[in-house]
Image: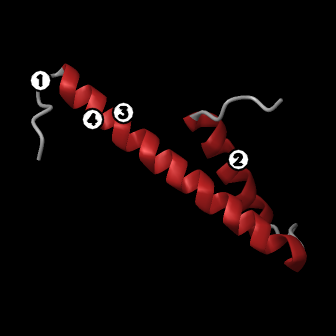
Amino acid sequence: MSKKLTYNSALEELENIIQEIEDEEISIDDLSLKVNRASILLKFCKEKLRSTEEDINAILGDGVAE
């Protein structure tokens, strides 16, 4: 079973994908799969940052709904 995705592991995987693309280590056949995975990881990271910001604002008392 795969380990639970965390912000740090998602960011590391994104960095690896970017490096592979920049180094031209990805075949054209795999490029679409890597870009799709990167998109999923980006969405995960954005959601994690948004929810963390909401949590921090709530803790600091600035959690008024906007």
Mark 2 → mark 3, Cα distance in angstroms: 20 Å
Classify 10 Å Cα crowding around label 1: few (below 14), some (14-19), many (20 and above): few
Q: Which residue is mark 4?
A: 54
Q: Which residue is mark 2?
A: 13
SS under mark 4: helix
Asked whether the residues under the numbered discs 4 and 3 touch, taking CB atoms below 8 Å apart as contact, a structural biologist would say: yes
Residue 2 location in percent, x, y? 79, 32
Of 17 and 57, the residue lying toward us: 57
Q: Mark on residue 52?
A: 3
Q: Marks 2 and 4: CB-CB under 8 Å?
A: no
The quadrant holding residue 57 is top left
C-alpha separation, residue under disc 2 versus residue under disc 4: 25 Å
Alpha carbon separation for disc pair 2 and 1: 34 Å
Please name the residue that numbered disc 1 is placed on: 61
> Along the polypeptide, which appears first: circle 2 or circle 3?
2
Q: Are marks 2 and 1 in contact (CB under 8 Å)?
A: no
Task: Identify residue type, mark 1.
Answer: Gly
> Measured from the top left, where is residue 37 in percent x and y?
69, 59
Q: Nearer the viewer, mark 2 or mark 4?
A: 4
